[in-house]
Image (cartoon, rainbow, N blue to C red):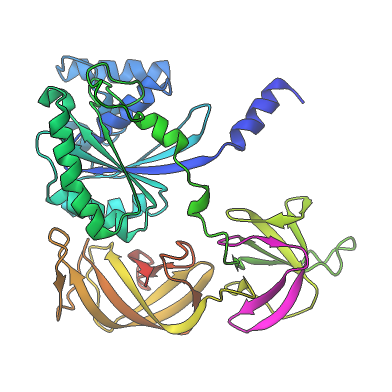
Amino acid sequence: MSEFQEKQDGYLNMELLRFTTAGSVDDGKSTLIGRLLYDSKAIFEDQMEAIELASLNKGEEQVNLALLTDGLRAEREQGITIDVAYRYFATPKRKFIIADTPGHVQYTRNMVTGASTANVAIILIDARNGVVEQTLRHSFIASLLQIPHVIICVNKMDLVDYKEEVFEEIRMDYQGVSDKLNVKDTRFVPISALKGDNVVDRSVNMKWYDGPTLLYLLEHIHITNDRNYDDTRIPVQYVIRPQSAEFHDFRGYAGRMAGGVIKKGDEIYVLPSGLTSKIASIESMSEKLERAHPPQSIAVTLEDDIDISRGDMIVGTSNQPQVGQDITFMFCWLNEKPLVPNGKYSVKHTTKDVRCVVKSIDYKININTLDQINDDENVGLNEIGKMTIRTTQPLVYDSYKKNRITGSLILIDEGTNETVCAGMII
């Protein structure tokens, strides 16, 4: 094997961490990502030349690293983030996918979509302003989406003379927020995205801080146990029947593992039918596997010929998921067209496509105060709340807290085919 091939295989096998940034307008999210990319040597020379030229044309005193992520013309003109910007980079430790999400309240849906797959949420707080309503809103969304790890970056420490007491006061204030929202793992880092303090390199201006830099945290934060390895869940995406002379009797059930660890000989259930069998083999591409776990894409064969089709779910004998047609979930409305009370929508849940009717809007949430709003079934763009639907066929599901894949769904407008709602099952 060539040295190039070895390096390529090593890169492909590196652990991937997805993280999202959130914060109020002008808290420095895009600048922070630009600083991460710049100081970790993840910017090409022509990219650097382009933002140097753009900064010069705007009459700025120094290179504006925010221009690396603010790709839309409107974003550059207004100096704000409007759409979710995805960036990819790698260090010798890990690969990263960054979702730079907007801070404005009217772009709540953008934050929800950008953060839905994240392992880590980086929430920026301006050291001059401390914890504000926007901080509460972003923390609530991170909690709602069950993001396992939250890193609070107290930014712009250079504007408060790098004072330890400012950082400690904000840390104490935010601790009350995280306790209320039940955020499991919260870390705090004092930084200056503009100057580079504690982003990639340790700050010489904050010698009182003895914790890790932001990049060190991102490289070493433990995410292996964030997936559910206890409850076997394989949503069937496709039934493989080659019907060739070589594989005349082959019948494989292909899908991406959503939970658990399986091995040859394991007894399984197929839901919603309730039929049972044992795993005869596990295959991935052209090789047979002894065992499989999330997020591997596999095909399994069973010892018995039973009726399985797309949308069914292969599960273990213990820790069964729920099966039902009345589904209650927390929602974020993603479309400018408001919800139709008692309206009919298409539902996509794992590999299952069904239709539903909205039974009730249980309550909405005031995103800034976290108060519940009852007796209001008018749901519009960016609103968050709790609803119940009834589906035309049973869904096999878990709570979102238990499994982010089998516990999530989307509603689709049948007329326009647009995704109108994201749901996290309770």
Image x and y of residue 410, in percent: 39, 67
For the C terminus, the image quarter is bottom left
Is 157 above or below relative to 352?
above
> Quick check: can you spot residue 25?
no
Furthest residue in direction right, as rendered:
245
Q: Nearer the viewer, residue 407 or 347?
A: 407
In the rendered structure, does residue 272 fall within the stretch colored magenta? yes
**422 to the left or right of 18:** left
Residue at image point 25% right, 56% down: 179
For the N terminus, the image quarter is top right
Residue at image point 36% right, 24% down: 200
Q: Give the range drawn in magenta.
A: 257-280
Image x and y of residue 356, in percent: 39, 81
Image x and y of residue 24, in percent: 17, 43
Image x and y of residue 347, in percent: 42, 73
In the rendered structure, does residue 281 fall within the stretch colored magenta? no
Residue at image point 9% right, 38% down: 129
